[in-house]
Every structure is written in structure tokens, then in C-alpha cells.
Amino acid sequence: MEGLLIAFFASFIAALFIVVSQSFHGRFTNDHDFDSIQKFHVAAVPRIGGIAIYAGLLFAWLWQFLYKSSFIPELGWILVSALPIFCAGLSEDITKKISAKLRLYISFLSAAFVYFFIHVHFSRIDWPWVDQNIFALPIVSFAATLFVVGGTVHALNLIDGFNGLMPGASLLMFAAIGCVSFFVNDSLVLHLSLTCFGAIAGFFILNFPHGKIFAGDSGAYFIGFLLSTLVLMLVDRNPMVSAWFPCLLLVYPIFETMFSIYRKVIIRKMAAMQPDGMHLHMLIYKKITRFQMAGRKESLINAVTSPYLWLLSLIGIVPAVIFWNNTWMTIGFCLLFTLIYLQLYWSLVFSRNIYRLFRKFAYKNARH
């Protein structure tokens, strides 16, 4: 709990300093792009919130190191391992010149550091033959670790579209990791998850609902790195935790990424990394919250979109906490989530009745 509080206050103070000092650095650090297909803010806002989150964890580690209070050396190694992808994201936030492909390769580098420095391995899927004959090979485990960490890093960045959406969902995920680590009496992962929760919560206060600061690529990549590292650490250290727990816990950003690739490459015949305006959170904003919140401030409409996606993410997070040690139940809920996601997505794309419903609702609210 001490780590949570220290990380929270350090992150909040760092985020607040970034916001109040933007007149000095905003020329380089503010997001001035209002016209891109994936931009929905109406004022220039600092997009270097990742610095606040990193600072929160770094200060918590330094405090523990100096005062020998519940010192966690693994946190220091995590911060070191995260530096390549964090710096790549921060460079993109400031220069807008770091290609997505290069950032992907750098995320693999950070994943390799996790593999060698912290000895976190993706070594099983709880299918005995596969685990004994395929994942037992070090090269397969190494490649799978790179794929999981790199994929999660970019999946979290993909859902970072509205005020509070990505950090709010990640807070729920870190809380879930903390719950399961408590169930299995893994004090290391529990302390790490609480400290990460505190660092993100400190930033979250200024990010939601009014969007005074954005996480940026540095923040999204860093949070994705933390989530993937801790969830792999939990599974690797505790054989009773299902190997499918991470998949169900992160099913929303994972499936959003997989479906986006399918939609772009197969349906729309475009490059997988080319941005488009057809992500689920964008459809909810365009087809639901803009009608529900008609006449309100744009920043508030932006923020109201996020709770819809938090609820969607809970369809994976809650069963993951309940069935953390049951492989077939976690697989089943992963499949259930995909069905719910696809039904919701196609309803928003094709059904006009839902548009009329929310127009009518917005009109009634406006009259009252």
C-alpha cells in the first residue's frame, strides 16, 4: 500500500507540473493535431503523460531503495527494461517521426530485456502436448514472450482514443492482477500491481474527464509493457493460474487489435498500420454519445464514451478474476467476448434503429 500511495502522489504531481508549465514546453509537447481521423479533442493538450506515470514508479522505487521499505528490486529492472519502448513512444509524441514498424521492433527489444533481466517467460498454454513439445524449446518461449509483450504494448496504444479510456481500462486490469496475486499469495506481483495502479491513478485524475493531459504513445506503450510483464510474471511464477488468464484479462485490447487488422487488410484492402476511423470506440462516440450528449461540451462528450468501453472490458476482466485457475472457462469467456464484440460492432455499423433511438433520447433530454 505504501508503494501505491507514493506512486500516486508522485505521478499526480508530475502530471500537474506538465499541465501548468505547458506554456513553456507546449510548442513541442502539445497535441496540435485536430484534423486527423483518430483525433477528437478540440484544444491543444500535452501528450506526454507517460512521463508522469514513469516518474511515479521511479519515485516509488527510489523511496523504497533509500528507506529500505518493502524494497522491490524487480521494479527497478522493469523500469530499465521499459526504457527503449518508453523513449521510442516519447520521441514519437514530440517529433511525430518514429515509424510504427520501428516502434514495434523496439517493443521487442524491451520484451527481450524482460526475458533476460527478470526471467519472465511465456512458456505454456496449458495444453500438455504443446507445452511439453513446443513451448519447452527456449527459442519458442523467447519468441512467444516477445510476441505477447510487443503485441500488448501496441494493443493498449490502439484503444487510447478518448479521455480516460485506456488508463481506466488498465486500472481495472491491474486491480484484477492484484486480486489474483492475492489469491495465490504472490506478494511480489501484488506489490508491483498496486504500485502500477497508483502511478496510473495519479495521471488518471487529470486525464479524465476533461483531458488536461494525454498519455501519448509513451504512456500507452509503458502501460501495455507493465500489464504484459506483470501478467506473464503472475502466470510464470504460479502454475495454478491458467495460462489463458492473461488472454481473458486483456481480451478487449487484444481482440480490438486483431479485428482491426482483419478489417483493414481483408475488408478495406489497406495497410494494417494505417489509421482509420472504424474502431469500436470511435463508432460508439459517433453513433451513441454524440446523440446522447447533444449540446454538451465536446470534452464531456469525449469522456462519456470511455465508460461504455470500460463496461465492455469488464466482460473479460470479471470472469478472469473468478475463473483464474480454470482454463476451459477462460477460453469459453474469450469466445463469448468475441461474439458480444462482433454483435455490438455490426449493430453500430449496419443498424439504423439504434441511431433513431439515441436521436430520440437526445431530443427528449434537450427539451427537459
Image (cartoon, rainbow, N blue to C red):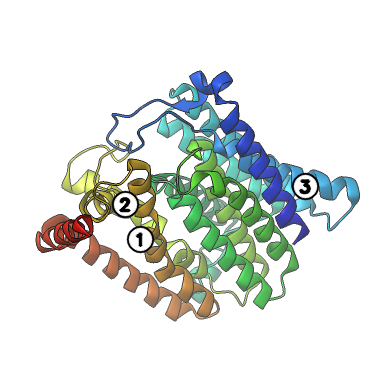
Position of 153 with respect to 355 (left or right) is right
Pinpoint residue 171: horizontal percent, then vertical percent: 54, 58
**Disc 3 residue type?**
Trp
**Disc 1 residue type?**
Tyr
Residue in the image at 17% along x and 43% along y: 268
Q: Label 2, on which residue?
A: 281
- Real-space Cα distance between discs 2 and 3? 35 Å
Question: In the picture, which quadrant includes the N terminus?
Answer: bottom right
Q: Earlier in the sequence, mark 2 or mark 3?
A: 3
Question: In the picture, which quadrant includes the C terminus?
Answer: bottom left
The quadrant in which residue 49 appears is: top right
Front residue of 195 and 19: 19
Position of 32 with respect to 113 (left or right) is left
Secondary structure of residue under mark 1: helix
Q: Is residue 301 something that shows in the picture?
A: yes
- Real-space Cα distance between discs 2 and 1? 8 Å
